[in-house]
Image (cartoon, rainbow, N blue to C red):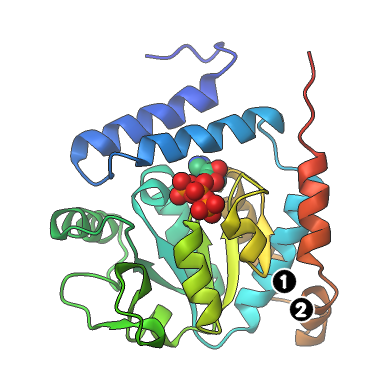
């Protein structure tokens, strides 16, 4: 039991979720290392949502609301940290959810599929029964996508994705949104909209934004998307990393 007064309380709670997910068998070995990389960046931004991250979230939600077939791609880490929040965001922006694992095994896919079902989300894509296609016909495990999901999606939200897959999605003509605490990652640099924030803060915030933006004219949403400069925003995100004593 972690005392609430502990200075790293939130961070330790997340670690605990990751450890439990690893014990349940749906994380790859490297998942905890990826989490640690995220933790380090979160520490450096003071474990709070920065202004450039908020700006990127408004743009991301506008892009999702303007899309015909938006999909949220989930892996083990995203599921362990924010399963309910992901389901709520999918409902709010009318997006599908698709499982995509870097080290895909039937066992992990099965566990994650059942987790979404147990949490009330029935139509999860990327399952063992789903029709899986290869983006741009690239016969590589990084290029797989559900036929009715990412394969035909116009916009894909890829929290905590690796650079190789992000590149394949980009070359496949997708509009890419990432949530990645590291503004220097290949995924952040390659995406159309990069949110340098912790997924546990970003996803629920995006759901709130969706409730607001849904009531706006489409012209307002287009303006948000068109005026956004991801490279500039990433520079600002990087400037948020300050080493204080
Ligand atoms: P790339 O291949 O894009 O350069 P990478 O090699 O760092 O990135 P991974 O090892 O797959 O890719 O790491 C996943 C990324 O997810 C890391 O950049 C890490 O900062 C980020 N990350 C980890 N945990 C979180 C979290 N809770 N919220 C947001 N981002 C996170």
Give how far across and how far down residue 48 sits, in percent. Answer: 69, 36
Give how far across and how far down residue 210 sits, in percent. Answer: 65, 67
Classify 232 as above or below 236.
below
Q: Callout 1 environment at 10 Å: few (<14), some (14 to 19), or many (20+)?
A: some
- Quadrant containing the N terminus in the rendered view: top left
Q: Nearer the viewer, mark 1 or mark 2?
A: 2
Which residue lies most toward the front here? Answer: 139
Q: Callout 2 environment at 10 Å: few (<14), some (14 to 19), or many (20+)?
A: many
Give how far across and how far down residue 72 sits, in percent. Answer: 46, 68
In the image, is 215 to the left or to the right of 179?
Answer: right
Choose the circle earlier in sequence order: 1 or 2: 1
Give how far across and how far down residue 241 sits, in percent. Answer: 76, 34
- Quadrant containing the C terminus in the rendered view: top right
Q: Are marks 1 and 2 in contact (CB under 8 Å)?
A: yes
Q: Dot 2: what SS?
A: helix
For the point 76% across and 54% down, the residue is 234
Q: Dot 1: what SS?
A: helix
In the image, is 217 to the left or to the right of 182?
Answer: right
Of residues 189 and 94, the one drawn nearer to the viewer in this rendering: 189
For the point 80% across and 38% down, the residue is 240
Q: What residue sits right under mark 1 in the picture?
A: 213
Mark count: 2
For the point 53% across and 67% down, the residue is 157
Classify 183 as above or below 123.
above
User: Is there any visible trace of residue 223 in the rendered image?
Assistant: yes
Q: CA distance from mark 1 to mark 2?
A: 7 Å
Classify 33 as above or below 133.
above
User: Is there any visible trace of residue 200 in the rendered image?
Assistant: no
Q: Which mark is residue 221?
A: 2
């Amino acid at each position: 039991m972690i005392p609430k007064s502990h200075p790293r309380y939130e961070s330790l709670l997340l670690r605990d979720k990751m450890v439990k997910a690893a014990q349940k068998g749906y994380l790859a070995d490297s998942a905890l290392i990826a989490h640690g990389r995220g933790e380090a960046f979160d520490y450096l931004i003071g474990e709070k949502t920065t202004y450039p991250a908020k700006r990127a979230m408004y743009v991301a939600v506008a892009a999702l609301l303007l899309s015909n077939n938006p999909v949220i791609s989930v892996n083990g880490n995203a599921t362990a940290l924010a399963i309910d929040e992901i389901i709520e965001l999918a409902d709010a922006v009318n997006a599908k959810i698709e499982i995509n694992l870097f080290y895909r095994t039937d066992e992990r896919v099965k566990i994650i599929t059942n987790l979404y079902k147990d949490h009330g989300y029935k139509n999860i894509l990327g399952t063992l029964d789903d029709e899986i296609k290869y983006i741009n016909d690239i016969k590589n495990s990084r290029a797989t996508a559900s036929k009715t999901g990412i394969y035909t999606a116009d916009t894909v939200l890829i929290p905590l994705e690796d650079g190789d897959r992000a590149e394949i999605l980009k070359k496949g003509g997708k509009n890419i949104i990432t949530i990645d605490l590291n503004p220097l990652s290949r995924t952040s640099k390659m995406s159309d909209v990069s949110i340098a924030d912790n997924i546990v803060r970003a996803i629920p915030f995006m759901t709130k934004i969706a409730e607001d933006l849904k009531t706006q004219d489409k012209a307002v949403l287009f303006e948000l998307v068109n005026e956004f400069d991801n490279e500039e925003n990433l520079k600002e995100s990087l400037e948020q990393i300050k080493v204080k004593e």
